[in-house]
Image (tube, rainbow, N blue to C red):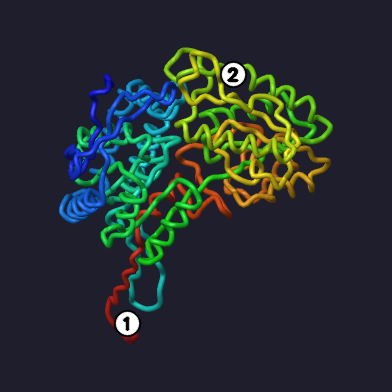
Amino acid sequence: MAIDLETAFDLVVGGRETPGTRGERRPVVDPANNRPFARAAVGSRDDARAALEVADRAFRESPWAQDDGARRAKALYRLAGLLESQVDAFARLETQNMGKPLRESRGDIGYVVRTVEYFAGLADKVEGETIPVPGPRLDYTLREPLGVTVHIAPWNYPLLLAIRSVAPALAAGNAVVLKPASLTPLTAVAFARLAKDAGIPDGILNVVPGSGAEVGEALVDDDRCRSVTFTGSGDVGARIAGLAARRHLPLTLELGGKGPVVVFPDADLERAAKGIGYGIFQNAGQMCWAASRLLVHESVRSELLERVRSIAEGLRLGPGTAEGVEMGPLVSPDQLAHVLEYVEDARASGGRVLTGGSRASEPALAEGNFLRPTVLAEVPPSSRAVREEIFGPVLTTAGFSDAEEALRLANDTPYGLLGTIWTRDLGTAHSFARRLECGMVVVNEAPITYPQAPFAGVKGSGVGSEQGSRAVETYTRRKNVLVNLGAAKKRA
């Protein structure tokens, strides 16, 4: 898949690629140097409505939703196979578009392959149940697809976080309209091309890039939309929830986090330091579940901070396509400026920069959006850097003296996505995990998940759950059927 400036990525609607009603295309830039390398169509409100119309017709007229799921399973397995054969091409496209190292992009695309395979295996297992009721009656349930489902994806894991919801929606028999992020639409369009080759009927998977304010709202605020899945900021999530509530739409929101990492004095500090570094510096910290708040017992605080600082300073920065690069650029100049504002706010509130905290100025990096991995100490708990999601390679640190103080600090956040515990004590791990106000907890490991494991947050981190076998149920409705089998015979 050769990519150059003349390569155009259009909308995919009804199995056809189209520049959209306005014919507008915008340059797509490589965040490692901020130079354009491709062009992407910009959809409009009319394009959103056209995609919904096509998807609705495909849902009603194609066999996709009508069979027992075997057809869907075979098509999704073919799709996974096609993607697996092009992992390197997709990874390079993802890296050029988003900036992360190729090693991470390959892992992301591999995860997408596994996700599609996993839900392909569930496509023919969308089952109802029989329910005992009095008398000569049969009561049973059916699980039926919703219709047209809308998926609004973020820019930090462009294809992975899109397909995490698209795959179960397709497996359940729905037609899908996907709106990728304006900054990173390329792999979603390329994926839709593969879907056609895999035999997914035209109109079942549609991709409409464009702005959230225009395309996103047009998709949600339309009678043909029967479900909304959104990953992104809390403010935008609240807006989408308001639009969905007007029509009582099923809604899944994943709205970010401010993950606590709690290190007890008995932890393996070498392993913990490596996990902490991976948890905040992978993808340049642009992760909803970034392990961004380090809480460490005072008895090992100095030693652990020195280890983490050393890891941060040892990371090799550079373009994601270069060999040996361990951290790429932030996705855009605006995101770089946004993250630096948090660092300056931390400084102004009395915080201390242990390492990083500035833009990389080496000639090879100067044109890109590179920020040095940053570790902050002594930042007041009320600081924006501690309270808000930064979405960059910035770690705040604080100490605690006992488990109760650690728990209070860990839960003192409006978010509740993922928490991390480092301890050798099994009782401490389980009891602390139960009391953490998070949808997910990992113990003695960097943030990690699998397609078969639920991904969910509490508090300001969202509503609903993704991944796991029950994700297919999210995109179905339950119908109850009661059949009277006739009057009971009188006894002789």
State the residue in front, 264 or 19.
19
Disc number lying in front (2 or 1): 2
Q: Is residue 179 left or right of residue 288?
A: left
User: What residue sits right under mark 1 in the picture?
Assistant: 488
The amino acid type found where label 1 is placed reads Ala
Q: Position of residue 72 (x, y in %)?
A: 26, 43
Could you say which is closer to the camera, residue 319 or residue 269? Answer: 319
Picture quarter with the N terminus:
top left
Q: Residue at x 22, y 51 (%)?
A: 46
Q: Is residue 444 left or right of residue 243?
A: right
The image shows residue 196 at horizontal and vertical percentages of 20, 36
At x 57% / y 44%, what residue is drawn?
Answer: 257
Tell me residue 472's x, y (percent). 38, 50
Secondary structure of residue under mark 1: loop
Q: Which mark is residue 66?
A: none
Residue occupying image coordinates x 59% and y 27%: 278
> Marks 2/1: CA distance?
77 Å
On screen, residue 64 versus residue 431, left or right, reads: left
Tag on residue 315?
A: 2
Tell me the crowding category of disc 1: few under 14, some 14 to 19, or many 20 or more residues within 10 angstroms, Cα based: few
Q: Earlier in the sequence, mark 2 or mark 1?
A: 2
The relative height of residue 148 versus residue 185 in the rendered view (above or below) is below
Q: Amino acid at mark 2?
A: Leu
Q: For label 2, count other residues whose C-alpha is less than 10 Å away and answer few (under 14), some (14-19) or many (20+).
A: some
When the figure is inspected, residue 210 is found, relative to residue 312, above or below; the finding is below
Relative side of 275 to 462, left or right: right
Quadrant location, the C terminus: bottom left
